[in-house]
Amino acid sequence: MVGKIKSKDSGHIEIKDIIRERWNEHCTKYDRHGYHSGEGREAWKALLTQALGDEKLNVLDVGCGTGIITLPLAELGHNVTGIDLSEGMLNIAKEKASNLDLSVEFKLGDADNLPFEDGLFDVVTNRHLLWTLPDPEKAVSAWKRVLTPGGKIIIIDGNWDGRRRLHERIWRYLISAPLVLITERRSPFQGHYDRDTERKLPMRYKERPQADIGILENLGFSVDVMDVPIPVFPRTRSLIGVLKYGCWGGRGSFLVKGIKEER
């Protein structure tokens, strides 16, 4: 009897199901970190204005989650659509948009199989998304398809598992980890997913933003990189927050802007 051959796409579907279930289960906890505070939204608006300018644009926020950058984009006057794989995350984002009286279109959908026609958006944004995708190149190619000529992809993320300086490693293991264990009663070394799933996420262990830049350049984008300032990390506003998360915030965080060719 010949066994079934498991296709690459079917494997990716299984991983996406795991990811969807994880975020549906943890969506309310995820939204308690303070990124939606007034100070946090103002910091995001300043960063996004620096990256995009003042022109009002058609923006697609992929993997929008609970609206961390979706809502600031809408507050800046952009015409924003948010798409996410998790129904739970989208429900929270919709409620927040309604509470702020913001007009945002939210859709349930996949980052690498977008339900939009070609050339519909001026900008595609995403925050902390690429590392969760089993095929990041396919996703970025899909984002390119829906961009207008000269349109921009904005990737906001961090080099969370890249090489760190000695004092940062000491800080993490001797100060940050014990404090997280004591104050939050959770393992500071437990990932978002099980190890088998994380091994199937290519960006999880790559040096960034170099890997992001490489994907964009291979698809014909010109690329610029910006640092993400500390004010958008609300966990580091208190002394205990700095001690727990200061070894992560700021240094490894980046914004990569890819500009699609005009032709």
Image (cartoon, rainbow, N blue to C red):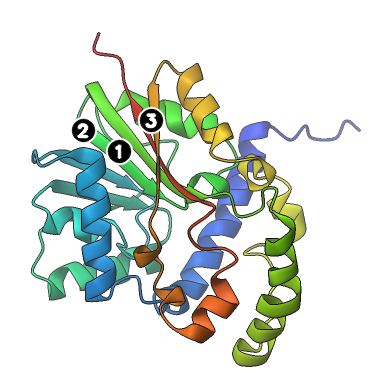
Q: Earlier in the sequence, mark 3 or mark 2?
A: 2
Badge nearest the viewer, 3 or 2: 3
Q: Which of marks 3 and 1 is nearer the N terminus?
A: 1
Q: How crowded is mark 2: few (under 14 residues within 10 Å), some or many (20 or more)?
A: many
Regarding mark 1 in the picture, which secondary structure is present there?
Answer: strand
Q: Residues within 10 Å of mark 1 (few under 14, many from 20)?
A: many
- Residue 129 in the image: above or below residue 98: above
Q: Nearer the viewer, residue 79 or 2?
A: 79
Give x and y (percent) for residue 207.
64, 40
Q: Which residue is labeled 3 in the image?
A: 224
**Is residue 69 at all visible to an observer of this figure?**
yes
Question: Farthest residue toward the front?
Answer: 167
Left or right: residue 146 versus residue 33 is left
**Identity of the amino acid at label 3?**
Asp
Q: Nearer the viewer, residue 152 or 147?
A: 152
Give x and y (percent) for residue 129.
47, 49
User: Which residue is found at the position 30% from the left and 38% from the top?
Assistant: 124
User: Which residue is found at the position 8% from the left and 69% from the top?
Assistant: 101
Give x and y (percent) for residue 25.
51, 73
Regarding mark 3 in the picture, which secondary structure is present there?
Answer: strand
Regarding mark 2 in the picture, which secondary structure is present there?
Answer: strand
C-alpha separation, residue under disc 3 versus residue under disc 2: 20 Å
**Identity of the amino acid at label 2?**
Phe
C-alpha separation, residue under disc 2 versus residue under disc 1: 7 Å
Q: Would you identify the image quadrant in which residue 103 lies?
A: bottom left
Q: In which quarter of the image is the N terminus?
A: top right
Q: Nearer the viewer, residue 76 or 47?
A: 47
Q: Which residue is labeled 1 in the image?
A: 124
Identify the disc placed on residue 121: 2
